Amino acid sequence: MTLPTSASAALFERARSVTPGGVNSPVRAFNAVGGTPRFIRSAQGAWLTDADGNRYVDLICSWGPMLLGHAHPEVLAEVNAAVLRGTSYGTPTEPEVELAEEIVRRTTAEKVRFVSSGTEATMSAIRLARGFTGRDVVVKFAGNYHGHVDALLASAGSGLATFAVPGTPGVPASATDLTLVLPYNDRAAVTAAFAEHGPRIAALIVEAVPGNMGIVPPEPGFHAFLAETCRAAGALFVLDEVMTGFRATAQGGWGLTGAVEGWTPDLVTFGKVMGGGFPAAAFGGRADVMSHLSPEGNVYQAGTLSGNPIATTAGLATLRRATDEVYAHLDAAATTISDAASAALTAAGVPHRVQSAGTMFSIFFRDGEVKNFADASAQDEKAYAAFFHAMLEQGVYLPPSAYEVWFVSAAHDDEAVAHVLAALPKAAQAAAAVGGN
Ligand SMILES: *Cc1c(COP(=O)(O)O)cnc(C)c1O
């Protein structure tokens, strides 16, 4: 055994002896890019500082939540004041009401219920849809991630309209044999599935803009088609805005589709940004559907820490500062960085494709349009790993996987953006040196 060469490496060794893989969520382990994950000690604005004192411009932003940047002074002041009033009471509180009002004001949801993670939000939305419709079947798309809900950790069955199989050991076949997994952006597959199973379908769930395989925008009208197909079949249309909500645009992913095309989802899920860096998430939607939830209705759902006063205070403090100027800034920073990354990769001869949705973008290490999970999977992951490590060495923290969004924040100022831009040419050359293997 070699001695750890850094504080991060030493922590990783300790972590691995007490936690599977040394991490509490798999992608953090750097398995897709190799090397030692950095243990972050503190963060401020656009910058992370690791256990060795190295600084990085953060292009993960906690996988989306840190819309205003890290340790925003006004958000921290509100959170600190809330902590001094006690951290959890297990009773209703005013911040919950205020955050719910803010979300209802900003989104299509007429009523919301708070939970503690995006996984809990989608799980609860599916249960409510099943309870409301009295039906059991759920439709999802390959490459769309909705948290680690058993029924949604599913892989496509052998035919388009056949039921799914478990996507991981530990999920019983009985949890996925009411799930249909279809190729994204494929209207014929949706039509075939509804033709065969329509009267049994409780809900169709889709990411408002898929971002968990990299950004794969819906083809124009695809989500309008889904909404109409659900309506015609008496199924609920569930829009998963956990990543895109309050992030892709001021109106989430829906701002790019439903707001333009004139449809609204029956149910919608939120997480990430709405918790301001704390564990808070929500599901909501049509008032007549939401009223089926306990205690108003008979579909059971509950949570000890749901609507926690610290988390809801942080979320509210974040959303109240998520102004049009903030979204304009995110847009500009995202465009500057994605344009420069594309230019550097082009100059180095690295095949790539930039795809974006509002302020969110990702870069696929392959040529040509990416329309679905099969397209996204055909990437040069080795080239990405070389690119990632060259950026990391130059003080830029990218997602440690080629299938993730690059997130910016309101704190990504000229200095932070310039730091990213300066690192790109060398990283593109590193990718070129291993590319095509
Ligand atoms: C992150 C995410 C989830 C799961 O949220 P967790 O808080 O990690 O459980 C669900 N859906 C989408 C679209 C996400 O991006």
Image (cartoon, helix red, strand yellow):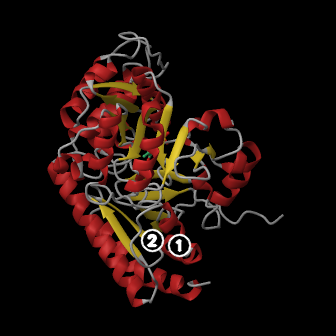
Tell me whether circle 2 and circle 1 mark residues in contact (CB < 8 Å). Answer: yes
The image shows residue 229, relative to residue 80, as above or below, that is below
Q: In 3D space, how far apart are the residues under numbered discs 2 and 1 (Cα atoms)?
A: 7 Å
Determine if the C-beta at disc 1 is less than 8 A from ligand 1.
no
The residue lying at 38 percent from left, 31 percent from top is 282
Mark 2 Cα-neighbour bin, 10 Å: few <14, some 14–19, many ≥20 = many
Q: Nearer the viewer, residue 376 or 4?
A: 376
Mark 1 Cα-neighbour bin, 10 Å: few <14, some 14–19, many ≥20 = some
SS under mark 1: loop
Q: Nearer the viewer, residue 322 or 362?
A: 362
Look at the image and tell me in which quarter the C terminus lies. Answer: bottom right
The residue pinned by badge 1 equals: 379
Image disc number at residue 364: 2
The residue lying at 20 percent from left, 37 percent from top is 106
The residue lying at 36 percent from left, 19 percent from top is 85
- The number of discs equals 2
Determine if the C-beta at disc 2 is less than 8 A from ligand 1.
no
Residue 367 location, quadrant: bottom left
User: Could you tell whether 243 is left or right of 301 in the image?
Assistant: left
User: Could you tell whether 12 is left or right of 294 in the image?
Assistant: right
Mark positioned earlier in the residue sequence (2 or 1): 2
The percent coordinates of residue 120 (x first, y second) are: 48, 31
SS under mark 2: strand
The percent coordinates of residue 260 (x first, y second) are: 17, 50
Look at the image and tell me in which quarter the N terminus lies. Answer: bottom right
User: Could you tell whether 228 is left or right of 23 in the image?
Assistant: left
Q: Nearer the viewer, residue 52 or 24?
A: 24
The percent coordinates of residue 52 (x first, y second) are: 57, 60
